[in-house]
Image: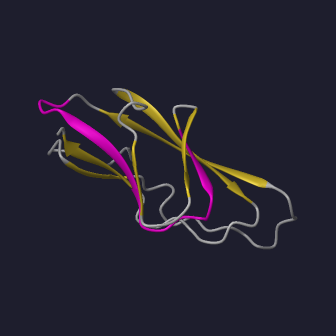
Amino acid sequence: MHPDATVSDPVGDEPVPSLVEWVFDRRRMENWIAWLRCGFDLHPTDACVSYLLRADSAPEEAQVFVNGERVGTISQTPYRLDVTNYVALEYNELAFRVEWNAAGRFEGLRLEAVPCA
């Protein structure tokens, strides 16, 4: 989570600000891979919550990693993935592996805490 961000309500969205507006430089050589990483903290809540990673837009076929484990591939947007079993209290790392020729950019990237079913 961004150091200046606070979460007062355990159910809601947590923006992942460092990846939201990134775009790729098309002047680069072919056949490279970009790794985009962002660290964030999750704090204990009184309520039972599940965590959903959401993206309104993202580079096509971006691979999603949480705490070093591959958890999915973004094949179409808007995108939603339950990452509850991959996150931990305290520090976490979200990463994306993006191919050099992927079309698109990250927009509306957030971690949403929703009440347990």
Q: Can the viewer see residue 6?
A: no
Q: How is the image coloured?
A: secondary structure
Q: Can the viewer see residue 91?
A: yes
Residue 23 x %, y % = 61, 68
- Magenta range is 45-65
As drawn, 52 above or below 103: above
Q: Nearer the viewer, residue 1 or 64?
A: 64
Q: Nearer the viewer, residue 46 or 78?
A: 78
Residue plotted at (33% across, 48% down) = 4
Q: Nearer the viewer, residue 108 or 91?
A: 108
Residue plotted at (17% across, 31% down) = 45
Residue 20 x %, y % = 47, 62
Marks counted in the figure total: 0
As drawn, 29 above or below 45: below
Residue plotted at (37% across, 55% down) = 110
Which quarter of the image is occupied by the C terminus? top left
Q: Is residue 63 rendered magenta in the image?
A: yes
Residue plotted at (51% across, 57% down) = 19
Q: Is residue 36 rendered magenta in the image?
A: no
Which quarter of the image is occupied by the N terminus? top left
Residue 114 x %, y % = 21, 46
Residue 49 x %, y % = 21, 37
Residue 106 located left or right of residue 48: right
Picture quadrant where residue 98 is located: bottom right
